[in-house]
Image (cartoon, coloured by chain):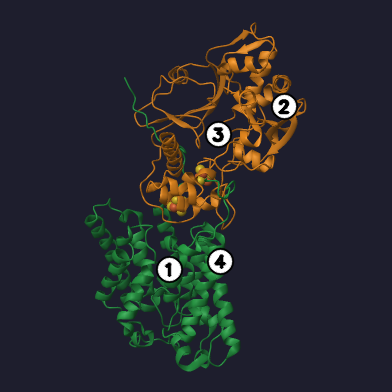
Chain colours: A orange, B green
């Protein structure tokens, strides 16, 4: 199961990422394909930016051209950004060639020499041909989130309210780099690879054209959606809910989860009982129990000033363990959103 | 046709620890000590406990209706408060005292502070303190349990110390104290079962081990200092740990969620000070048992203690110009 409790007495809930070891699964092909790359012979920043919407992951290269932020390291994530998914690992295992090519293109286009590829330890043997510094990341959530990688692996703590670009890091997934490499090798892929997780928890890799409506995929797998089911784009910790089956596969859809209504759990409006579970699990040591009291009372300003709202990296672990089932992450996002609004209104 | 899907914020999974589970596990951990209490004190103990649990739940229900809030007795916390409260009472407690006690525990100590999670004090202890101050005679365990026919030396060791100095407890066999052959509250006399229950909760992670451990260390240090200063007057650490409300206090009362701190250093300070206050009150205060007021006092400073917290990673001082 998803859950493993370990550590006598200290009750740490360890959430491990799915590891793609052993035999490779074969992706189910739904639609799409590849075109020959005729238009972009020189892959410079403008060219990459102009087609970024068609590159899986939809990277934005703006930060290299028009901003004062100085990027000194490009980090390629060969690890997953959420639980249950295996997309990035699959790409890393099957497309080392393209990734290597992509890295060369990136080096030339951006002028950044320092390129790091971050992978879980079981994939180390697949990276030997890749011309980049290989770093091993822990296989426990949330260590692959950009802020955690930059803190634990690169030793750069992202200050509150700042992004990792402010500390000179630029993140790309291995799939994005492989797509860029594919371009350089003369192929434009129209497809997005993603992990499809059925109601019974079965995982399948699916390759479908970007823009395919989700109901085509559901039809292919014979999934019957019923009222009160949940359809999730993204992983179980950080994904978003889809309310319409006409929604299409996006360039950054790594995972699609169909959750049966019997597995759907609801948040509650019980107040915080001060059990401290959230504090113990928070990777950045936020005073979540105090913060939630302020946020629930809509004291967003105070929450930000006194209880470090902007340090949160939005991993969702606090909501995951909350005994009162408070949707803490939702409160945090709402607070940031409201503060943003207020700031805009002031200007 | 349009399927109505659920749309809700992430995360979409939960580790399954909910309040009901916490309450049930705590009640489960209290059961051995409770059964031992039933064994020692018989049917009148059963009556006190049953009355306490049921009235606690009824008060909760009444509070829900009065405040027009959703009914919350389903989460088990009212039952838990009723249970811990009754386990502190002597088996001879009259019914009206139980009723008043649970009223104070549920309505005064918790309800008017906003229900679950809002209580600044441990509800059971607050209720007990009210009874203790209003009807002190009820808690003279030696008097209260006079009618029981015990085959062993049945005395409240703490009041023995208070009256006769540490020679008063020389007749207590440590083993008997451990298994509960002493006069005291229904569920608070059988040390060994309370320890088992407490350790179970610690292993399962339902209470914070830091509090229990530092509480015990606090008691040991303070009582040891008293003991070496005047061995004739003050009892040693073991008596302090095995007698009175100590063990139930250490594992089940001081660790109550909303009235105890959650950060590491505050938990240690809280535990140590609880131990210190307990022994101070026992040795030089007016009350026989210091646990009740020791913990209540520390409950009071808990919000201040919890201000000591680790620096959040990424926090920059004064970046709000
Ligand atoms: S989402 Fe919760 S656990 Fe994660 S960083 Fe933010 S406050 Fe901490
Ligand atoms: S986990 Fe939930 S109930 Fe427990 S302290 Fe954190 S916010 Fe409060």
Q: How crowded is mark 4: few (under 14 residues within 10 Å), some or many (20 or more)?
A: many
Quick check: is the Cβ at mark 1 less than 8 Å away from ligand 2?
no
Instruction: Tell which circle, 3 or 2, labels the residue nearer the N-terminal end.
Output: 3
Q: Mark 3 lies on which chain?
A: A
Query: Residue A55: where, in percent of width, then height?
Result: 59, 18
Query: Residue B62: where, in percent of width, then height?
Result: 23, 59
Q: Residues within 10 Å of mark 3 (few under 14, many from 20)?
A: many
Q: Which of marks 2 and 4 is in front?
A: 2
Give the left or right position of residue B174, taking residue B259 as reference. Answer: right
Query: Residue B187: where, in percent of width, then height?
Result: 41, 73
* Residue, disc 2: A112
Q: Which mark is residue B268?
A: 4
Q: Mark 2 lies on which chain?
A: A
Q: Are marks 4 and 3 in contact (CB under 8 Å)?
A: no
Q: How many angstroms separate mark 4 from mark 1 (CA)? A: 16 Å
Q: Nearer the viewer, residue B35 or B106?
A: B106
Q: Nearer the viewer, residue B85 or A343?
A: A343
């Amino acid at each position: 199961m998803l859950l493993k409790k370990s550590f006598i007495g200290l009750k740490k809930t360890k959430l491990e990422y799915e590891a793609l070891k052993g035999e490779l699964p074969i992706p189910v092909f739904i639609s799409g394909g590849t075109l020959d790359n005729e238009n972009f012979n020189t892959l410079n920043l403008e060219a990459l930016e102009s087609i970024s919407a068609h590159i899986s992951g939809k990277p934005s290269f703006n930060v290299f051209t028009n901003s004062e932020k100085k990027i000194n390291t490009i980090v390629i994530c060969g690890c997953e950004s959420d639980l249950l998914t295996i997309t990035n690992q699959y790409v890393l295992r099957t497309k080392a060639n393209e990734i290597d090519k992509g890295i060369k293109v990136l080096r030339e286009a951006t002028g950044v020499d320092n390129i790091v590829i971050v992978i879980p330890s079981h994939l180390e043997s697949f990276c030997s041909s890749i011309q980049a510094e290989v770093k091993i990341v822990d296989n426990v959530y949330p260590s692959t989130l950009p802020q955690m990688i930059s803190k634990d692996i690169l030793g750069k703590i992202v200050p509150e309210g700042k992004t990792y670009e402010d500390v000179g890091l630029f993140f790309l997934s291995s799939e994005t780099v492989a797509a860029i490499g594919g371009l350089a090798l003369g192929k434009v892929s129209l497809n997005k690879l993603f992990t499809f997780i059925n109601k019974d928890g079965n995982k399948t890799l699916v390759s479908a054209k970007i823009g395919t409506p989700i109901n085509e995929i559901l039809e292919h797998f014979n999934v019957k959606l019923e009222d009160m089911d949940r359809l999730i784009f993204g992983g179980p910790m950080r994904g978003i809910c889809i309310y319409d089956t006409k929604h299409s596969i996006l360039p950054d859809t790594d995972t699609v989860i169909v959750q049966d209504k019997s597995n759907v759990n609801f948040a509650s409006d019980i107040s915080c009982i001060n059990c401290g579970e959230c504090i113990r699990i928070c990777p950045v040591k936020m005073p979540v129990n105090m913060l939630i009291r302020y946020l629930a009372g809509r004291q967003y300003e105070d929450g930000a000033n006194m209880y470090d709202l902007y340090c949160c990296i939005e991993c969702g672990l606090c909501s995951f363990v909350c005994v009162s089932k408070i949707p803490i992450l939702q409160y945090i996002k709402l607070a940031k959103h409201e503060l943003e609004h207020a700031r805009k209104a002031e200007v | 046709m349009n399927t109505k899907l659920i749309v809700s914020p992430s995360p979409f999974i939960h580790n399954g620890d909910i309040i009901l589970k916490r309450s049930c596990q705590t009640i489960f951990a209290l059961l051995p000590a409770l059964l031992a209490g039933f064994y020692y004190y018989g049917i009148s103990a059963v009556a006190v406990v049953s009355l306490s649990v049921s009235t606690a739940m009824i008060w909760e229900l009444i509070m829900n209706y009065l405040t027009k809030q959703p009914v919350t007795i389903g989460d088990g916390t009212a039952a838990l408060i009723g249970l811990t409260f009754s386990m502190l009472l002597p088996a001879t407690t009259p019914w009206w005292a139980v009723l008043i006690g649970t009223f104070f525990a549920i309505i005064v100590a918790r309800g008017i502070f906003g229900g679950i999670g809002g209580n600044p004090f441990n509800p059971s202890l607050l209720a007990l303190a009210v009874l203790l101050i209003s009807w002190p005679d009820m808690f003279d365990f030696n008097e209260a349990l006079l009618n029981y026919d015990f085959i062993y030396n049945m005395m409240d060791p703490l009041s023995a110390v208070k009256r006769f100095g540490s020679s008063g407890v020389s007749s207590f066999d440590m083993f008997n104290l451990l298994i509960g052959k002493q006069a005291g509250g229904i569920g608070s006399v059988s040390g060994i079962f309370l320890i088992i229950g407490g350790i179970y909760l610690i292993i399962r992670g339902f209470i914070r081990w830091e509090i229990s451990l530092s509480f015990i260390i606090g008691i040991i240090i303070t009582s040891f200092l008293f003991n070496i200063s005047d061995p004739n007057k003050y009892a040693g650490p073991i008596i302090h740990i095995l007698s009175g409300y100590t063990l139930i206090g250490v594992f089940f009362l001081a660790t109550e969620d909303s009235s105890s701190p959650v950060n590491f250093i505050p938990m240690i300070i809280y535990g140590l000070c609880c131990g210190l206050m307990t022994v101070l009150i026992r040795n030089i205060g007016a009350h026989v048992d210091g646990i009740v007021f020791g913990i209540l006092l520390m409950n009071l400073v808990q919000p201040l203690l919890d201000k000591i917290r680790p620096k959040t990673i990424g926090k920059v001082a004064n970046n709000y110009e």
